Image: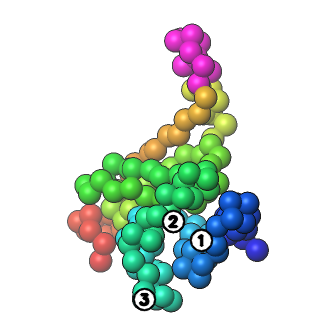
Amino acid sequence: MSKLLEKAEERLRDQGGRMTNQRRLLFSILDTLGEHPTAEELLLLAHQQDPELNLSTVYRTLRWLESENLVSSRVFAEERRQERFDPALPTEHHHFMCTNCKAVIEFDSELFGVIKDHFQDENSAKVVTGSIVLYGLCSDCHHRVIFKGSKLKAD
Ligand SMILES: [Zn+2]
Ligand SMILES: [Zn+2]
């Protein structure tokens, strides 16, 4: 069984909450998707299996997962600022977002420790956690520009 689904089920049980089919559906989509969807994107995917599901249920489920620390919400610098939900169990990791196709790539970097140390030394501060977001063109979009010399728009 997958991680998020398993943990969510466990927490629900502890709290005496019910594992409804709709909750299970949302948990498992988040788990297998491996992306950072918006609530609307999640609803769209869920509708393929359950057309009855509505956006407020999606939000309520996401907020609950957030309060349980099973997803975290992130806002990237996009033209349309929207909340995206990150199903990676809250571990410290970083993101790259392609400004053309909006693909999000997660990465870890040992060098982040150097940045933290540097900041702490300079500011006599204690850094608890942090996350870097890099922006640019993903490999596909980058190559499309180089080889086709085309405008930055997906075909
Ligand atoms: Zn992430
Ligand atoms: Zn791209």
Residue 103 in the image, given as x and y percentages of width and height = 44, 63
**Residue at x 69% of width, y 65% of height:** 16
Residue 61 image label: 2
Camera-nearest label, 1 or 2: 2
How crowded pointer 2 is (Cα within 10 Å; few <14, some 14-19, many 20+) is rated as: some
Query: Taking 18 as reference, is 137 left or right?
Result: left
Mark 2 and ligand 1: say if the CB distance to the nearest ligand atom is below 8 Å. Answer: no
Q: Which residue is mark 1?
A: 27
**Element under disc 3:** loop
Residue at position x 55%, y 46% from top? Answer: 94
Q: Are marks 1 and 2 in contact (CB under 8 Å)?
A: yes
Task: Name the residue nearer the viewer: 2 or 34.
Answer: 2
Q: Which residues are magenta?
A: 117-127
Residue type, numbered disc 3: Pro
Q: Which residue is mark 3?
A: 51
Tag 2 secondary structure = helix
Would residue 90 be counted in the magenta stretch? no
Q: Position of residue 101 (x, y in %)?
A: 36, 65
